[in-house]
Image (spheres, rainbow, N blue to C red):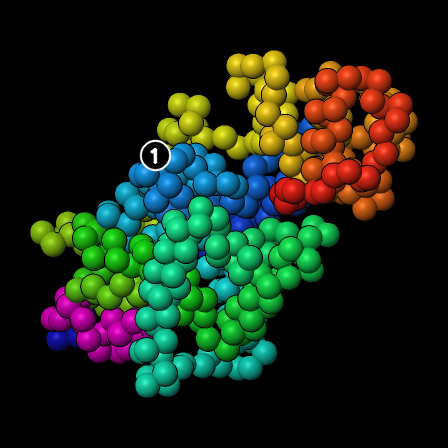
């Protein structure tokens, strides 16, 4: 007897929902990245605060009682918690249904297929050992980050480079990361999810967690018609057609195999007891779980979406004598003036910066006016001790820039 055909509409709808969510996340994160670089009255947090892997990188410092490592915000830890909870229920759904870098690779994958007329598969003798590279990257990054207290991967992170495409730092501080981004996107033209399969440390970590997830892709051998469409649809080349339960840590829970399956009941997102979610339900529930956790953290005031101004940071510290270490490359000169109680015209006289340009970040004023973060820190300390120092201050004569630009 012929196998019953699976309804086409819910399978198409599931793919539409998945791609719409991925496109929306990429659009939002891209917009936030641009706004963070260009500044303004309300400045979104930077890429480091919106990456769950940052939460894992700072875990060693947190567990050791040292607090968050530099650049990392509490939001990264909360995103990590949301990703882990989601993985315990829906495997690597963060990778397959939320991650904007993963979606960017799929976009280039689609472009590559149009250009080249096909998708390529890495030879098995190369593919199998190459899959372990991401676990090596994970181990090395965590080891050196926890040992040094610095974000070791940041200089090579393609997602950091993507979020600095509009920044003058792209070809200086982020040059290596930009080279990796270019390599990832070129690789994605030929191989699906190139970075995800071979180098992503976050994917490696969630892959380990996903072994314990409640829902997995499960195949009913009696309903299966052995058409192989599920294998061809999988962006990470998991052999779904030969598995009763997909336990591979490579599975990103994208649901593409289920959407491609033409046999009713042959493939589904199921628990070990047989409870099944429809294709659209799996797409919506997995993303909703992650989103609800983030929204709850935001409602509780734990998740910051914008960078606090220097004045706000001073007030939060509970002391009038603020720590000049709070002055960073992303801090505007007008924010420094407000927090330090220095009239804007002082900076005009000393550094030549007109008031119309004092809303710019110090990293943008560094070259034309010599307003590096270290220089301004030194000036603020000296000025607050004796305001008359402004009359004799020689910019850059006695100070070195000791801080990076965000």
When asked about the image quadrant of residue 46, the answer is top right
The x and y percentages for residue 313 are 57, 23
Image vertical order of residue 232 relative to residue 276, above or below: below
Name the side, left or right, on which 368 lies relative to 280: right
The x and y percentages for residue 222 are 11, 71
In depth, the one of 202 and 220 nearer the eye is 202
Name the side, left or right, on which 149 lies relative to 229: right
Based on the picture, tell me whether residue 235 belongs to the magenta stretch.
yes
In depth, the one of 119 and 223 nearer the eye is 119
Image vertical order of residue 268 relative to residue 299, above or below: below
- The residue pinned by badge 1 equals 65
Q: Is residue 360 visible?
A: yes
In depth, the one of 296 and 318 nearer the eye is 318
Q: Which residues are magenta?
A: 219-244
Based on the picture, tell me whether residue 126 belongs to the magenta stretch.
no
Name the side, left or right, on which 35 lies relative to 375: left
Tell me the quarter of the image containing the N terminus: bottom left
Name the outermost residue toward the front.
398
In depth, the one of 169 and 91 nearer the eye is 169
Q: Residue at x 23, y 74 (%)?
A: 241
Q: Residue at x 36, y 56 (%)?
A: 143
The x and y percentages for residue 344 are 82, 22
Name the side, left or right, on which 319 lies relative to 396: left
């Amino acid at each position: 007897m012929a196998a019953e055909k699976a309804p086409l509409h819910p399978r198409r709808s599931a793919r539409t929902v998945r791609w719409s969510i991925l496109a929306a996340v990429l659009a939002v994160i891209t917009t936030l990245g641009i706004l963070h670089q260009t500044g303004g009255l309300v400045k979104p947090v930077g890429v480091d605060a919106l990456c769950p892997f940052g939460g894992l990188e700072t875990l060693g410092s947190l567990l050791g009682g040292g607090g968050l490592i530099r650049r990392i915000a509490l939001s990264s830890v909360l995103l990590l918690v949301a990703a882990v909870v989601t993985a315990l229920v829906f495997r690597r759904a963060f990778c397959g249904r939320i991650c904007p870098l993963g979606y960017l690779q799929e976009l280039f994958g689609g472009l590559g297929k149009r250009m080249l007329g096909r998708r390529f598969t890495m030879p098995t003798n190369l593919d199998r050992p190459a899959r372990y590279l991401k676990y090596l990257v994970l181990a090395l990054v965590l080891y050196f980050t926890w040992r040094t207290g610095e974000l070791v991967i940041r200089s090579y992170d393609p997602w950091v480079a993507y979020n600095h495409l509009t920044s003058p730092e792209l070809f200086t501080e982020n040059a290596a990361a930009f080279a990796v981004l270019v390599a990832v996107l070129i690789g994605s033209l030929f191989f699906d999810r190139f970075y995800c399969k071979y180098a992503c440390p976050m994917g490696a970590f969630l892959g380990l967690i996903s072994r314990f997830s409640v829902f997995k892709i499960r195949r009913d051998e009696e309903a299966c018609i052995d058409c192989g469409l599920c294998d061809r649809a999988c962006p990470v080349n998991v052999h779904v057609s030969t598995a009763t339960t997909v336990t591979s840590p490579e599975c990103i829970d994208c649901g593409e195999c289920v959407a491609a399956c033409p046999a009713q009941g042959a493939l589904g997102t199921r628990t070990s007891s047989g409870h099944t979610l429809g294709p659209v339900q799996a797409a919506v529930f997995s993303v909703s779980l992650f989103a609800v956790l983030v929204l709850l953290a935001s409602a509780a005031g734990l998740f910051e979406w914008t960078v606090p101004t220097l004045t706000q940071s001073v007030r939060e510290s509970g002391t009038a004598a603020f720590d000049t270490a709070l002055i960073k490359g992303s801090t505007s000169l007008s924010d420094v003036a407000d927090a330090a109680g220095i009239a804007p015209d002082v900076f005009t006289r000393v550094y030549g910066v007109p008031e119309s340009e004092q809303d710019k970040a110090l990293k943008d004023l560094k070259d034309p006016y010599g307003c590096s973060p270290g220089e301004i820190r030194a000036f603020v300390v000296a000025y607050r001790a004796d305001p008359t120092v402004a009359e004799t201050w020689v910019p850059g004569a006695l100070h070195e820039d000791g801080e990076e630009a965000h």
